[in-house]
Amino acid sequence: MTAEGAKSGEDVAQLMQRIGEQAREAAARLATATTADKNTALRQGAASLRARQDDILRENALDLAAGRRKNLSAAMIDRLALDAGRIEAMASGLEEIADLPDPVGAVMAEWDRPSGLRISRVRTPLGVIGVIYESRPNVTADAGGLCLKAGNAAILRCGSESFHSSSAIMESLSAGLAAARLPAAGIQLVPTTDRAAVGAMLTMSDCIDVIVPRGGKSLIERITAESRVPLFKHLEGICHTYVHTAADPEMARAVVLNAKMRRTGICGATETLLIDRAVAGTLLRPILDALVAAGCEIRGDAETRALDDRVKPATDADWDTEYLDAILSVRVVDGLDAAIAHIARHSSSHTEAIITEDATAAEAFLSRLDSAIVMVNASTQYADGGEFGMGAEIGISTGKLHARGPVGVEQLTSFKYVVRGTGQCRP
């Protein structure tokens, strides 16, 4: 057990129970914390990230070196790596969260009844949020900041890959909480890389109100199977971009290139390109030229291979694969209906995009597909809470209950009904 801060003789189960009880106590205080205090913690946390940049980068170098020794994939290394720009993005994200309206106490709706009662639906914190993630240290700042703004306590369990980086980032969040005189247990990073900590979190329904898993397919599947706590989750990001007959050629080339290659290791990266047969002969080659020049491997169906001999054969499994790498599967389809049918069969319900100048086709695409995010004429890499104006996100939820799409401060709240009367007695 690698448990810095664990009490003498304390095992993982005891450690996690203590962390959970401290979080539950902190959540009660954070639920009524003032907006000013929460914003102070966020802004001071951002300032600390900037001030501690060298320390964070030094700890990140340890994680990167260990990751390379473990032969982590290029996509995993990219997710793990920090630099001055990414640290500034974390700090700016905390400040953007501080600038958002405080969701706690916001009146969602209110109405009067014939009885004279005044009824309001009011946002309230969820309570304690557990976040289980692997190689992205920035999740530490994003998740901690979002949970705090929404009046929740957070228990963050990073993977061993990012333990040093996340611990260094956590120091800045703790500094922010201290500056605002908010409870230190409001944001806690699990101080052990022992995998038993994950198992413990999944059974802590007495302390944790919801768990957000962020990681690979095997981690999500395990958490889904074992958790006794409700989840906000997505299993995979199998995202599609569809080039319609009425697509602008230059727009199609630029958007597809960005959607695949801007960052291949994020869940919003396009993994499958669909293109209408009517324009494949003229539009596909320039798109593939740009992708290949950027270092992308293309795997395609028979029609795609007939148009370009650089394309490798796609297997049935390719249509259901989240590559998280510079690999793209390509299929030629016979119009909008065929594209929608392919997406409905193979999508993970994350993000889909259509490139078209035909408004009718665009609206049909938007209305007939039920993924969490659907787009017209935009890169799927915009599937991100920060780009949605949420400051950051705790993850992308592809489920249909409570939260869907980017999970920001509003999605980290529930609600209660407030009823005001003047002495009414029900007849």
Image (cartoon, rainbow, N blue to C red):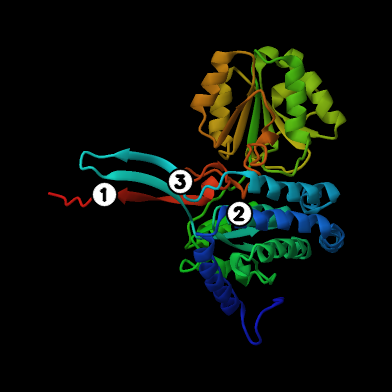
Q: Amino acid at mark 1?
A: Gly
The image position of residue 136, as x and y in percent, is: 73, 54
**Image spot of residue 293 (x, y percent):** 87, 29
Q: Give the residue pinned by disc 3.
A: 401
Q: How many marks?
A: 3
Decide: marks 3, 2 in contact (CB < 8 A)?
Answer: no
Outermost residue on the front side: it is 422
Q: Nearer the viewer, mark 1 or mark 3?
A: 1
- The three-letter code of the residue at mark 2 reads Ala
Q: Is residue 183 above or below residue 250?
A: below
Q: Earlier in the sequence, mark 1 or mark 3?
A: 3
Residue lying at 45% horizontally and 46% vertically, measured from the top left:
401
Q: Is residue 118 left or right of residue 427?
A: right
Which residue position is annotated with label 1? 421
Q: At which x and y percent is residue 62?
A: 85, 64
Mark 3, other Cα within 10 Å: few <14 / some 14–19 / many ≥20: few
What residue appears at the point 52 percent right and 73 percent down from the top-left corner?
Answer: 21
Q: Nearer the viewer, residue 419 or 315?
A: 419
Up the image or down, 74 lies above or below 282; here it is: below
* Residue 130 visible in the displayed image: yes
Nearer-N-terminus badge (3/2): 2
Picture quadrant where residue 314 is located:
top right
Mark 3, secondary structure of its residue = loop
Q: 326 or 215: which is nearer to us?
A: 215
Looking at the rendered structure, the kind of residue marked 3 is Leu
Q: Residue at x 47, y 43 (%)?
A: 400
Mark 2–mark 1 contact, CB under 8 Å? no
Categorize mark 2 by other alpha carbons within 10 Å: few (<14), some (14-19), many (20+). few
Q: Is residue 213 visible?
A: no
Classify 10 Å Cα crowding around label 1: few (below 14), some (14-19), many (20 and above): few
Q: Which mark is residue 36?
A: 2
